Image (tube, rainbow, N blue to C red):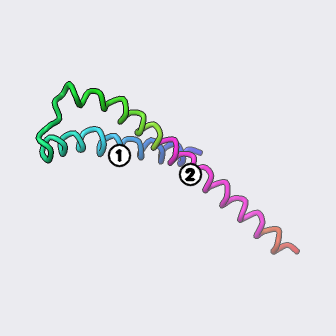
Amino acid sequence: MKKAILSGLGASIIFYIVCGILSGTLAVIIFFTGDPFIMSFHRYTYMGLVILCGIIVTCTVFLNAKLDNLKNELLNNENRK
């Protein structure tokens, strides 16, 4: 469980850095736009995506661990027979 939470938190931080900071800088360089007032409206979208990314990664790691435990239990039961 601790691994799932840390993975989700790490993914959220990386996603925030990439989307929140680098994409705004790239938008200014590429499109010559990115007025701070206009970019402020995207902060809510970025934060929603960051939270969603963290939830998806956390649930995926958690389900992967549960399925791995289930697979090991099934293999152990087959070996006992």
Residue 17 placement (x, y as % from top left): 30, 42
Q: Amino acid at mark 1?
A: Ile
* Picture quarter with the N terminus: top right
Question: Eyeballing the image, is 73 above or below 4?
Answer: below
Q: Nearer the viewer, residue 2 or 26?
A: 26
Which residue is located at x 53 percent, y 48 percent? 3
Q: Position of residue 24 (x, y in %)?
A: 22, 39
Residue linked to disc 1: 14
Which residue is depicted at the point 23% across and 44% down?
22
| Residue 56 in picture, x, y percent from top left | 52, 46
User: Badge 1, how many Cα within 10 Å: few under 14, some, many 20+?
Assistant: some
On screen, residue 74 above or below 50? below
Q: Which residue is identified by label 2?
A: 60
Helix, strand or loop at label 2? It is: helix
Magenta residues (range): 54-75
Q: Which residue is pictured at 14% across the width and 40% down the height?
A: 28
Q: Left of 63 or right of it: where is 56?
A: left
Earlier in the chain: of badge 2 and badge 1, it is 1
Quarter of the image where the C terminus is located? bottom right
Asked which quadrant contains residue 72, the reply is bottom right
Q: Looking at the picture, tell me which residue is in the foreground, 19 or 58.
A: 19
**Amino acid on which disc 2 is placed:** Thr
Horizontally, is 76 left or right of 40 in the view? right
Q: Is residue 61 magenta?
A: yes
